[in-house]
């Protein structure tokens, strides 16, 4: 019934994801359902009056999305952190995306699509969403095979963004050709590649773990070391808060700053100190190559991190809007040797190397 080459490709995609999850995130791997039956898929198609693209059908034949139990909602403030696509958090906005099982594809599509004012013949189904209390939805166009994510104007203007390059999608309903690939398959393959290559990793919060979409590797993540203080920085596009109708704040990016003190401690003018504490920040934010903000201020998100050798990274997240789809952030932190309460010397600047703000080809 299905092209054998496509079945093998889908199996390889799932094997890569499951292998990574089993090793690194077994509690999320355990939420994957067994495969859906042909009857299950046909029932969905009958109820929603759609024809799923071939690659998506086969993806569901291997695993019918994710299901969660009450124990998975371990922190009522965030919802469930076990979505296998992962997400990000900044301020009080926390997203973790999971794959919907077919029964939820049906129920969510029936609930959401009528609110969007799409034409009756539109063939969109909801296939992924955030399992936290911040809303984010992904829609598969069953005719074209493209995957879309809703923006902040989804309900008002049906505004969505494609999640995969259109040029890569081909033959989503044709069994007679060799290279069928819809956005759902391409999206999951790219996600597996990023996990396997360490581009994205798990993030440990106080009492839960989740997959973080903040990049961990160059060139999307910058690293700078100044006087023994190491700062890593990267950003992620936040489509569900974008507003393409806005003049100056079309795109919203969250950024993650990770800072730590190297084992040899803080070294200033040849003197070594066992600690240092942040006091001040300076940011230069660019849209394309134009400076749109030059910001100075005390602390970071109201905190003055005190760094010691051997401590885990101090991590904080924030966000910034941009009028264009690309830009950058760079800057510095002013640190005090010792601590603010017991300073051992004058302030010194720690560089934050430039890191990109970029709407990516693949949106997660």
Image: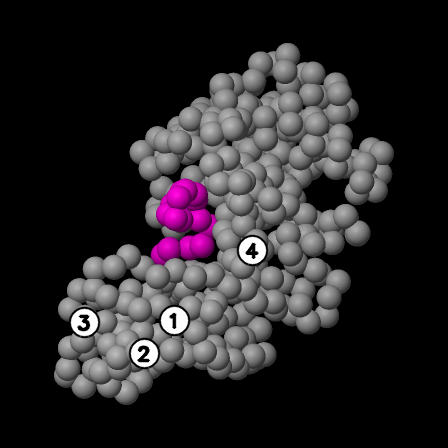
Q: Residue at x 54, y 64 (%)?
A: 319
Say if mark 2 contacts mark 1, CB within 8 Å: yes
Q: CA distance from mark 4 to mark 3?
A: 33 Å
Check contact, mark 3 vs mark 1: CB within 8 A.
no
Picture coordinates of residue 242, whole percent (x, y): 66, 58
Residue 113 visible in the picture: yes
Q: Earlier in the sequence, mark 4 or mark 3?
A: 4
Q: Which mark is residue 274?
A: 3
Would you say the residues marked 4 and 3 are in contact, meaning their CB atoms lie under 8 Å apart? no
Q: Is residue 109 above or below residue 272?
A: above
- Looking at this rendering, what residue extends furthest in the top direction? 39
Precedes in sequence: disc 2 or disc 1: 1
Asked if disc 4 and disc 1 are in contact, CB closer than 8 Å, the reply is no
Q: Is residue 9 found left or right of 120 in the rendered image? A: left
Mark toward the start of the polypeptide (2 vs 3): 3
Cα separation between marks 4 and 1: 19 Å
């Amino acid at each position: 019934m299905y092209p054998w080459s496509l079945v093998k490709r889908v199996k390889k995609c799932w094997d890569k994801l499951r292998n990574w999850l089993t090793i690194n995130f077994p509690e999320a791997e355990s939420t994957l359902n067994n495969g859906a039956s042909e009857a299950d898929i046909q029932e969905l198609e009958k109820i929603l009056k759609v024809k799923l693209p071939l690659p998506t059908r086969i993806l569901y034949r291997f695993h019918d999305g994710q299901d969660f139990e009450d124990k998975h909602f371990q922190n009522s403030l965030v919802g469930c952190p076990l979505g296998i696509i992962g997400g990000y958090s900044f301020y009080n906005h926390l997203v973790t995306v999971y794959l919907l099982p077919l029964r939820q594809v049906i129920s969510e599509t029936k609930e959401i699509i009528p609110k969007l004012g799409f034409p009756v013949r539109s063939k969109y189904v909801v296939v992924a969403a955030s399992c936290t209390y911040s809303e984010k939805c992904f829609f598969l166009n069953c005719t074209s095979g493209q995957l879309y994510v809703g923006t902040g104007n989804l309900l008002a203007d049906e505004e969505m963004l494609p999640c995969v390059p259109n040029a890569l999608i081909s033959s989503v309903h044709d069994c007679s050709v060799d290279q069928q690939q819809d956005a759902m398959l391409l999206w999951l393959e790219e996600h597996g590649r990023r996990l396997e290559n360490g581009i994205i990793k798990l993030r440990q919060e106080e009492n839960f773990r989740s997959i973080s979409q903040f990049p961990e590797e160059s060139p999307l993540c910058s690293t700078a070391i100044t006087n023994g203080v190491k700062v890593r920085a990267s950003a992620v596009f936040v489509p569900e808060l974008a507003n393409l109708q806005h003049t100056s704040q079309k795109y919203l990016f969250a950024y993650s700053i990770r800072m730590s003190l190297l084992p040899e401690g803080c070294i200033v003018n040849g003197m070594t100190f066992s600690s240092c504490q942040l006091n001040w920040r300076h940011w230069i934010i660019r849209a394309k190559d134009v400076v749109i903000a030059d910001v100075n201020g005390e602390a970071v998100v109201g905190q003055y991190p005190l760094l010691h050798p051997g401590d885990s990274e101090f991590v904080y997240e924030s966000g910034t809007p941009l009028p264009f789809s690309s830009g950058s952030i760079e800057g510095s932190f002013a640190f005090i040797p010792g601590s603010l309460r017991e300073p051992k010397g004058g302030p010194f600047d720690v560089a934050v190397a430039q890191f990109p703000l970029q709407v990516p080809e693949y949106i997660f």
